[in-house]
Image (cartoon, rainbow, N blue to C red):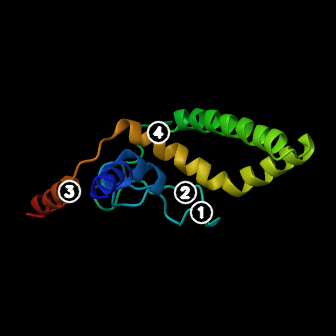
Amino acid sequence: MHFYKKIATEMFGKGSKLYSTFNLKCPQCHTGEMFETGSWSFKKSLDMNPKCDKCGLNFFPEPGYYYGAMFISYIWTAFFSLGFVFFCNWYLELSLELSFLLLIILTVINFVYIFRVSRSMWINVNYKYDAEAIAKFEENKKSKLN
Ligand SMILES: [Zn+2]
C-alpha cells in the first residue's frame, strides 16, 4: 500500500505538474495562487494575479503570452465535446439533440475552469517546480531592504 501511496503523491502531490496544473497553483512554488478568486466563483473569474505572492514569479512574462493557451483550450474542448456526444448518443442512447444540449450546458458551467486550466497548463510547460523558490524570494527581499 505504501508503494501506491508514494506513486500517487509523486503524480498528484505537491511538486508534480498535475498538482499545480489542476489546482491552479503557481508553477514554480506550488503554493501561491494563480487566480484571485476560487475556481467556481464567477466574480473576477478571468482575472489573474500579475505575479506569485509567495515566490515572486511573474505570471505575465511577455505580452500576449497566453495566446497559446487559447489553442490548448480549443483542442481540449473539441476532444472532450466529441467524446461526450459519442458517450451520450451511443452508450446512453440519448438523441443527438439532447446530447448536444447537455454538452452546451456542461461547457457553460465549466467555462471558467477550462479557461483557467488552459492557462495553467500553458505556464506549467514553461516553468518547473522549485522547492527553494519561496526561500530564495524571501532572501532576495531581505537583501534588497538592507
Ligand atoms: Zn510561486
Q: Residues within 10 Å of mark 1 (few under 14, many from 20)?
A: few
Quarter where residue 110 is shown: bottom right
Say which element carries label 4: helix
Nearer to the camera, 14 or 111? 14
Gap between marks 2 and 4 measured at Cα: 16 Å
Q: Which residue is mark 4?
A: 122
Q: Amino acid at mark 4?
A: Trp
Nearer to the camera, 45 or 3? 3
Of labels 4 and 1, earlier in sequence is 1
Where the C terminus falls, by quadrant?
A: bottom left
- Residue found 40% across the figure and 42% down from its top: 124
| 39 relative position to 60: left or right | right
Disc 3 Cβ-to-ligand 1 distance below 8 Å: yes
- Residue found 29% across the figure and 54% down from its top: 6
Of labels 3 and 4, earlier in sequence is 4
Q: Position of residue 57 (x, y in %)?
A: 31, 50
For the residues bearing labels 3 and 2, Cβ distance under 8 angstroms: no
| 19 relative position to 76: left or right | left
Q: Which residue is mark 2?
A: 47
Of labels 1 and 3, earlier in sequence is 1
For the residues bearing labels 2 and 1, Cβ distance under 8 angstroms: yes
Say which element carries label 2: loop
For the residues bearing labels 1 and 3, Cβ distance under 8 angstroms: no
Residue extending furthest left? 146
Gap between marks 3 and 2 measured at Cα: 24 Å
Q: Position of residue 103 (x, y in %)?
A: 78, 47
Q: Amino acid at mark 3?
A: Phe
Gap between marks 1 and 3 measured at Cα: 27 Å
Gap between marks 2 and 1 measured at Cα: 5 Å
Q: Amino acid at mark 2?
A: Asp
